Amino acid sequence: MGKKRIATSTSGEDTQKQSAGSSQKKIKKQLIKGVIYVTSSYNNTIVSITDNSGNVCVWSSAGSIGFKGTRKSTPYAATLVSKDAIEKAKRLGIQEAKVVISGIGPGREGAIRGIAGSGINVTSIVDSTPIPHNGVKPPKPRRV
């Protein structure tokens, strides 16, 4: 493993550079309009809130709140996930949002209920669940 080295700086320039770099991280951008993406699967519900250019600002999932196992896939967990994500986004100043839902799972309706009850103006709700247009090739018929 070798010796552990501790870097210490005695000049004042290094400390000024570090303090300037840390103050840049504290700047939060204001988010007035956004897009809320709800991804609902059979096992989990994930809510991501992005700005209009598609950069994720806030996200939350049932596992990150504290649900484990089969409780992550419940509509109640999805309601709490959407409320948690919107509370984080309200700190950034979000006021209105467009909702995009994808996936089939029990958390779809619960997430919409949580978003509607949070006090954010919802401009539109879009379902972007991928649907196969032709599907996979069927198996060969049995030869008996």
Image: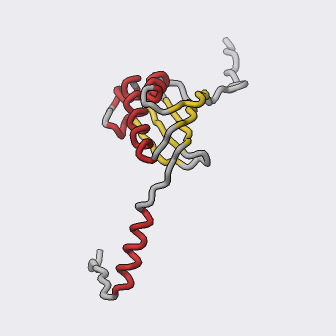
At x 50%, y 51%, the residue is: 30
Residue in front for this viewpoint, 144 or 88: 88
Q: Looking at this view, name the residue that lies furthest to the right.
A: 134
Give the quarter of the figure containing the N terminus: bottom left
At x 38%, y 75%, the residue is: 18
Give the quarter of the figure containing the C terminus: top right
Image quarter of residue 2: bottom left
At x 49%, y 54%, the residue is: 29
Q: Where 139 sits versus 15, above or below? A: above
Q: Where 49 sits versus 143, above or below? A: below
Asked whether, in this view, residue 111 is left or right of residue 77, the answer is right
Position in image of residue 7 (x %, y %): 31, 81
Is residue 6 in view from this perspective?
A: yes
Asked whether, in this view, residue 111 is left or right of residue 98, the answer is left
Q: Where 94 sits versus 44, above or below? A: below
Q: Looking at this view, name the residue that lies furthest to the bottom.
A: 11
Position in image of residue 64 (x %, y %): 36, 40
At x 38%, y 82%, the residue is: 14
Residue in front for this viewpoint, 28 or 70: 28
Position in image of residue 82 (x %, y %): 43, 33
Please state the total of marks drawn on the protein image.
Answer: 0
Image quarter of residue 102: top right
